[in-house]
Image (spheres, rainbow, N blue to C red):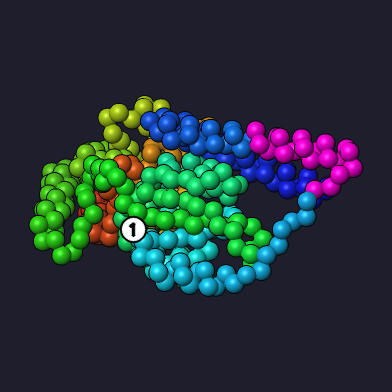
Amino acid sequence: MSENLAGLQREINALGERVGALRSAHTMYPDDARGTAEAALAELEYAERLLGDAGSELADALSGRSGQPRREGGSDERALLRAVFSELTVPVVLLDQDGHIRRINNAGADQLGGAPGYLTGKPFTHFVDLRNRAALRSWLASVLRGDGPAALDSRMAQRGWAEDVHLTLTRLELPTEPHPLVLVALSPTAHGNEDEGPAPLEPEVEDQVVVLAARRLDVLTRMTRLLLRRSGPALGEAAELLADSYADWVVLDVLDRPEPAPARRAAVAGPADAPDELCASVERAVPEDSDVPGRVLAEGESLLHPLIEDGAVLGHDDAGAPLLGLIGAGSLLSVPLRGSRGVRGALTLIRRSNRGSFRLADLGLIEEIGEHIGLAMPPRPPVDP
């Protein structure tokens, strides 16, 4: 009886966490209400069954009856895995009950842009766009409970950028495993890619290379002209230029006071439809209190997140909600503003999840722009003796 109660409590706790995640996702992404509502209905149906099962067990306990013994099995898992991963040419991922990658075939590893050994053990949701993670967790829980297979569209990392994919989730029960597993198949979406930003670039497509190279050169030229026509760097204008031509949000943090004074948030530029309170929350965030740009300021090394794994790396608003989630971020990069005497600040660019992700070529360009801004900044005042 105590084991049943402990298991019930674990299920209730997990259900509460998923419901909280769905509530937050609905608040941050109201346009995705349909997908969130479908996942919420699945959770509601599960809660109904959970209460029914708990009532039945309670009735059995009061009447002196005991539950059925747990079914155990013992067949060869290896034969099944060999068949699945050697014969299927579609990307396939096998997840454990916690949503971590248990096995992944070569096509799946290629889809996620890593080696199978590197990807094994990592949470599958880390490769999924922020706006889809809460719903995916709920569908995983639904499939694991035996509610039937599930299918959804999402955006996932692929070779350093993001791609829209269709996910099909199926429950597997293996005799050698005490808990069911989930088999995830990845396939192209029916609607195709609807990116608003730069499309994924294949090296062999010469026309795309020329177009994107010209676009990057134009951004660099405009930034250089902006910095040269001023006696000092116009940080607000620089942020707006990048937000208009290369990203959705741009954050500039500078170290322009004597050490050990902290960095200050010098400029924030966002899209025209961004709420004023959201812009104010980004402006109020303390740079050193977040991983981005905190690590860039402390270590002087650039950071690139083609697909954001942790929505809290840019900090939180006053209510504790992750800023990247409120922004609807999909990818991020942050580079140091490097002057003649070291790091002078950090430049952070964010693209929303409906745009193409930042790539290494973008990082190289923004690093060069960051160096130009850093060199244009006036020297920091000396420390008072």
Percent position of residue 101, x then y: 51, 61
Percent position of residue 304, x then y: 35, 56
Percent position of residue 153, x then y: 38, 45
- Residue 239 vs residue 9, the one in the foreground: 9
Residue located beneath label 1 in the image? 158
User: From this viewpoint, is residue 250 visible?
Assistant: no
Q: Which of the 4 image quadrants contains residue 367?
A: bottom left
Q: Main secondary structure of the magenta part?
A: helix
333 to the left or right of 223: right
Find the magenta span and give its range: 48-67
Q: Residue at x 79, y 40 (%)?
A: 57
Q: Is residue 165 above or below residue 267?
A: below
Task: Name which residue type carries label 1.
Answer: Gln
Farthest right residue in view: 64
User: From this viewpoint, is residue 34 visible?
Assistant: yes
Is residue 144 covered in magenta?
no
Q: Residue at x 53, y 73 (%)?
A: 79
235 to the left or right of 315: left
Q: Secondary structure at mark 1?
A: strand
| Number of numbered tags placed on the structure image | 1
- Residue 101 vs residue 321, the one in the foreground: 101
Q: Residue at x 27, y 30 (%)?
A: 272
127 to the left or right of 347: right
Q: Residue at x 68, y 65 (%)?
A: 73
Disc 1: CA contacts within 10 A as few (<14), some (14-19) or many (>=20): many
Percent position of residue 70, x then y: 74, 56
